[in-house]
Image (cartoon, rainbow, N blue to C red):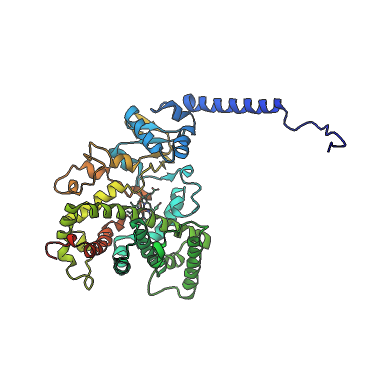
Amino acid sequence: MEPLLEDTRPSVFLPQHVTLLLTALGVYLMSTWIYNLYFHPLAGFPGSKIAAASGLYEFYYDVVKKGQYLYKIEEMHRQYGPIVRINPYEIVINDPSYYNEVYVTSNTRRTSLWPAYRSGVGFDDCHLLTEDHHLHRRRRKPLEPFFSRIGIIRMEETIISEAKSLNNRLEGLKGSSSVICLDHVFTAFAADVIAEVCYGSPSKMMTKDEFGADCAIHPDTAAGSMMTQRVEQAQRESAETRVREKPTLFRHIMTSDMPASEQSVERLTNEAMAIFGGATGTTPHALALISYYILSNQEIRERLGEELAPLMSDYPDNPPKSTDLEKLPYLQAIIKEGLRLSYGVMRRLPRRSPDVALQYKQWTIPKGTPVGMGAYSLHTNSDVYPEPFDFIPERWLGAYDPRMNESWVPFSRGSRKCLGSKYEPIHPLYFAHGLVWCQSTNKKWQSSNG
Ligand code: HEM
């Protein structure tokens, strides 16, 4: 039907408005690109012009090509040298001798985060995502005793008991033709251990179907609301009795001198997420990768079996301690090589020096500039690690090139290094237990003593 009255009001957007908008946008973009290329404080740094002009280049490789910028940065280093500007704001350096200058301890100088690199992960205001140096220190400090050497030894009983549960669960699956994804197995294992540490009771992931594979750690998931409940419970417990027989991380935080504003349920849930994410995001990957190389290589299996056999002879009644396992050079070499090839975090971890400029060779990097170094580049440098993509534990035995330790950074370094890095000696423990299972499922794996 024809409208009775014709609408004579002018359209809000006339073609000339669109043209005007596009022109304004074009002028804005052009002037930003010109500023970034010729007037920005980082304008004189080496690197590709297209990367320096805007964030679009990085967006293309990381979003459209799904995380490929890392490899593009590698190409940039080959073309422009060890220091490159990878977008308008950031510098990346590929030189192990400079690592300790970027990732410094808190008594050397302040270090702040580059928030753009972290925003959107959903755990805001946990210590991992805290931008300011002093606030980060305040939030991290009460956590440190739990992950110190003594804290780890206190955890050992928990780990042994969880490892036994793991072996039992795997034993139960033997002969069932189930395909087991080791990533899920080790994630469940790490989650149960860390839940014990944080709350004093396991999350029972190891008892779940598929080892709780669908249980994503995010505030909006079931895991998120479970963590909120656990934090609330810890809050009630700490109000009832100030000192508990079995200290847990969250009871400790709640009885610490942290201001009440820092102890809200919401913030502590985010803290729990970060700790669970830290423990379950990296450790399982390293363990699954190492397991793969052990299981697929008979020579490695046999050599490790022989080294482990004396300590495992009385398992499970008398399980080995981490302090014994730490003394096994081949096991240690396997772990170091596994951490090298699983990288920790592959990508650059940008840090800012808010008070002083950094000097790298002839380059003065203005204070506040995000500067990152990536474990992937350092761990795959063929000058330092010949045949870098091969799993060769033997490279860590005997008198090896000291540059290998300098370039080995799976836990990062400095004031924001991995809170769980002292877990490193505990990995053997995870392993020895996992290997018991391998041993019992594969007769060839039996050591000459067994
Ligand atoms: C193979 C094992 C692990 C590797 C390779 C690893 C790697 C890393 C790396 C590279 C960082 C630095 C991230 C950054 O600079 O932004 C980090 C931070 C962190 N990791 Fe781990 N991690 C491991 C195990 C653990 C475990 C078991 C925990 C459990 C407590 C943990 C908790 C954390 C936390 C809370 C942080 C943040 C530290 C801070 O910002 O002060 N990680 N980890």
Residue 347 at x, y = what percent?
38, 42
Q: Quadrant of the C terminus?
A: bottom left
Residue 337: where, in percent of width, then height?
24, 49
**332 w.r.t. 42: above or below:** below
Front one among 376 and 275: 376
Residue occupying the point 48% across, 36% down: 59
Residues 379 and 153: in front is 379
**Residue 219 visible at all:** yes
Query: Which quadrant is the N terminus positioned in?
Result: top right
Q: Residue furthest left?
A: 448
Q: Is residue 41 above or below residue 155?
A: above
Q: Tell me where residue 278 sits by quadrant.
A: bottom left
Answer yes or no: is residue 41 visible: no
User: Which image quadrant is residue 181 in?
Assistant: bottom left
Tell me if 335 is positioned left or right of 71 in this view. left
Q: Quadrant of residue 446?
A: bottom left
Position in image of residue 355 (x %, y %): 43, 40
